Image (tube, grey):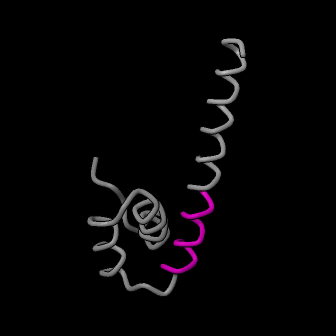
Amino acid sequence: MGFWDTVGKAANAGLEKLRETGEEAQEKYDKFDRYSDEQLKRTYRSGNMTDKMAAGKHLEERGYRRKD
């Protein structure tokens, strides 16, 4: 197996993980739709990466902005 075969396999594995993370974030986004603002804030502060992605998206849609 050559160098570029290894690079290609690593890239494909990375893309697959990214796709899975996006799907997980979308599922959590749908679940968090019924959360209150306070529940979303708690989830954003203490959740894992996909929790933060989903909760943050909802908070932005509800008018909250990140502090600069």
Report whether 48 appears left or right of 15. left
From this view, report whether residue 7 is shown above or below residue 68: above
Residue drawn where x is 61% and y is 55% of the image? 20
Report whether 43 appears left or right of 24. left
Q: Quadrant of the N terminus?
A: top right
Identify which residue, 37 or 43, lies in the foreground: 43
Q: Position of residue 33 (x, y in %)?
A: 52, 81
The number of numbered badges drawn on the structure is 0
- The quarter holding residue 62 reads bottom left
Residue drawn where x is 33% and y is 66% of the image? 47
Identify which residue, 34 or 18, lies in the foreground: 18
From this view, report whether residue 10 is shown above or below residue 17: above
Q: Residue furthest front?
A: 1
- The quarter holding residue 45 reads bottom left
Identify which residue, 21 or 26, lies in the foreground: 21
First to last magenta residue range? 22-32
Residue drawn where x is 49% and y is 87% of the image? 34
Q: Position of residue 5 (x, y in %)?
A: 72, 20
> Could you tell me what secondary structure mostly forms the magenta stretch?
helix
Does the magenta segment cover residue 24? yes
From this view, report whether residue 16 is shown above or below residue 53: above
- The quarter holding residue 48 reads bottom left
Q: Position of residue 15 (x, y in %)?
A: 65, 40
Identify which residue, 32 or 47, lies in the foreground: 47
Residue drawn where x is 28% and y is 53% of the image? 67
Q: Position of residue 32 (x, y in %)?
A: 48, 79
Report whether 18 appears left or right of 45. right
